[in-house]
Amino acid sequence: MDYSKVELDALRKLSYELKIDVIKMLDKADSGHIGGAFSIADIVTCLYFKVANLDPQNPDWDERDYIMLSNGHVCPILYAALARKGFFPKEELNNLRKIDSLLQGHPKLGIPGVENTSGLLGQGLSQGVGIALGLTMDSKPNKVYVITSDGEHQEGQTWEAIMSANKWSLNNLVVIVDRNHVQIDGNTEDIMPLGNLKEKYESFGWIALDINGHDYNEILQTFDFVKKIDQPVAIIAHTIAGEDISFMERLYKYHDWKDDPVEVEKALKELQAELDKFN
Amino acid sequence: MDYLLEKYKNESELEKMATREAFGVAIVSVANENDDVVVLNADLPGSLKLNDFMEVFPERYLQIGVAEQNMASIAIGLSHYGKIPFITSFAAFSPGLNIAQIRIGSIKNQNFKVVSSHYGFHVGPDGASAQMESDIAMMKAIPNMVIVNPADYNQTKTMTHLISRAKGPIYMKLTREKFPVFLKEDAHTEIGKVQKLLSGDKLTVIATGSMVYETLQAVLEVDKDGGKVELLNLHTIKPLDKEGILESVRKTGKLLIVEEHNIWGGAGESISRIVAENHPVFTKIVGIYDTFGESGSHRKLWEKYEIDRVAIASQIREII
Ligand SMILES: Cc1ncc(C[n+]2csc(CCOP(=O)(O)OP(=O)(O)O)c2C)c(N)n1
């Protein structure tokens, strides 16, 4: 089923608003990770505002789906989404990375809506396997969505987790890989080649799908499809690092960002122009 | 025992440098001296200041990707073959994530070096997970492991040379933040020996790494005329300089240890053991009081968690 333009546009518009929040947050924080935050922004928007079953008033609700961010450094986009969804007041975004504040530089259990403590790459998928196993033992229908980066597929533990999800045929586990091809010091294929992740997941017994991680219709249809699959599913989301900011796109040097007033202004202007197209 | 630069008291006149910058410079000259030296890194070469090394010795630079366990075991293989590998990352990831691999390489005293930056609260805004309050505890409990924690830029350059020549597994800790350069470039440094920076007869203060200059300022503030507080620079945490430490506490009869590490498992506990076994005196440790950090600048974190010069000075005042 194709989604209506109205529905898709509402989500797209929201993603620009979240990105504007992120630029403002990082400007106030003086630094933070942006490349991956923007490559995964469209999927984060779909998950939080369309796909997952969540109750911001009751973050520990038993019936909720679990959204986990294994590549925790891209948390500015997560925090922007959680705030907009109502998990905590939007004012908290102003204190990102500051002492005595709620929003830590990497997600930590205890922040409303956060399901895993991260910051060390490669551990989130195993934690997701743990939650998925618990749900399976208790025959519960909740889904577990684990967002991962391509860079953390260089950690051996990621592959240990992939193997174990297959062993227990965890049909409640969905992995999204932000395949943006960049990491800190360069392009992934130069640093440590990852190759064809779809084929690798398949050879580990998973159903794997290559999708365009910026196409809302494709993203939503994929999430609909995976709900019907009786196996662990990997969505390899082909994305663009720094998506929507002309001077950042695809460049690994924007993995993280020391805010610069000129760049902040330019980025905000470009996002506002996109937003204005909806009015 | 002439270690301090002449103007060491005047912080504003001292150059500020991070010790990781010294490592970046020194590793190039170490590699020039010894063809067997190779450097491994896990997607953080800029943070370890390896840019010069990568340019001068591209064939001796191995980028492993985000894979610290693989990095450590590859290094152990290289060392078995005859190379001298340096594995480099943040302390939270190495040894934080590859302690078991490092331990295996230490069983036969293999010749590899673990060089890690951003220890203690040094990652600042990135928050608790990438900070590192427990690395000394992990590493000191591994038999054969040597741990060095140089106090400034100049000492780190010297130490990089020393560890490349010493055989066996050695862990060297580096700071991210810039601190005053206050030790002489040619000061005599020997692995396993404390350096007496100030002499005194009422209290021995032992500080290590990032805490040495901070403690020095605290001492200058409290002991204005000098002569009361003896300050030792503990650039080697393991093995401990038993004689050097005991000689000082025999004279002063009181001991304060300052470190940017959890008080559980840090250098302080090991020093306390040596003192308790040989010449028990009143002892106190200033360190991270069994808590994780949080996001914030490292200065603000030092203040909040009471390991800054104000907190150190008030401890010294209380004791003497
Ligand atoms: C275990 C571990 N090692 C190293 C790091 C440091 N680090 C933070 S982000 C990053 C790059 C990872 O690549 P990726 O997540 O693909 O980057 P992005 O797409 O966000 O640019 C690294 C090495 C870490 N957080 N955890």
Image: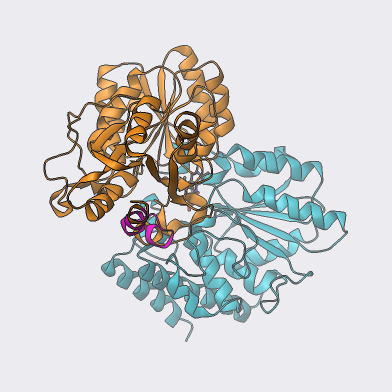
- Residue in view at x 58 percent, y 43 percent: A153
Q: Nearer the viewer, residue A133 or B10?
A: B10
Tell me how many marks there are: 0
Q: Return the x and y of residue A33 as percentages of the image width and height.
A: 43, 58
Please state, as top left, top right, bottom left or bottom right, where the N terminus of chain B lies in the image.
Answer: top left
- Please say if B65 is above or below B62: below
- Please say if B270 is above or below A138: above
The colour style of the image is: by chain
Q: Nearer the viewer, residue A83 or A159?
A: A83
Q: Return the x and y of residue A174 as percentages of the image width and height.
A: 71, 55
Lateral position of residue A181 relative to residue B217, left or right: right
Identify the magenta region. Answer: B302-315
Q: Nearer the viewer, residue A93 or B273?
A: B273
Q: Return the x and y of residue B86 as percentages of the image width and height.
A: 40, 27
Q: Is residue B312 magenta?
A: yes
Q: Which chain is cyan?
A: A
Q: Nearer the viewer, residue B182 or B90?
A: B182
Colour in which chain B is shown?
orange
Q: Is residue B130 visible?
A: yes
Chief secondary structure of the magenta portion: helix
Q: Return the x and y of residue B87 as percentages of the image width and height.
A: 43, 30
Lateral position of residue A39 relative to residue B165, left or right: right
Lateral position of residue B226 relative to residue B35, left or right: left
- Residue in view at x 28 percent, y 32 percent: B195
- Residue in view at x 75 percent, y 45 percent: A165
Q: Is residue B151 magenta?
A: no
Q: Is residue B52 visible?
A: no
Looking at the image, the residue that sits furthest to the bottom is A279
Lateral position of residue B27 relative to residue B224, left or right: right
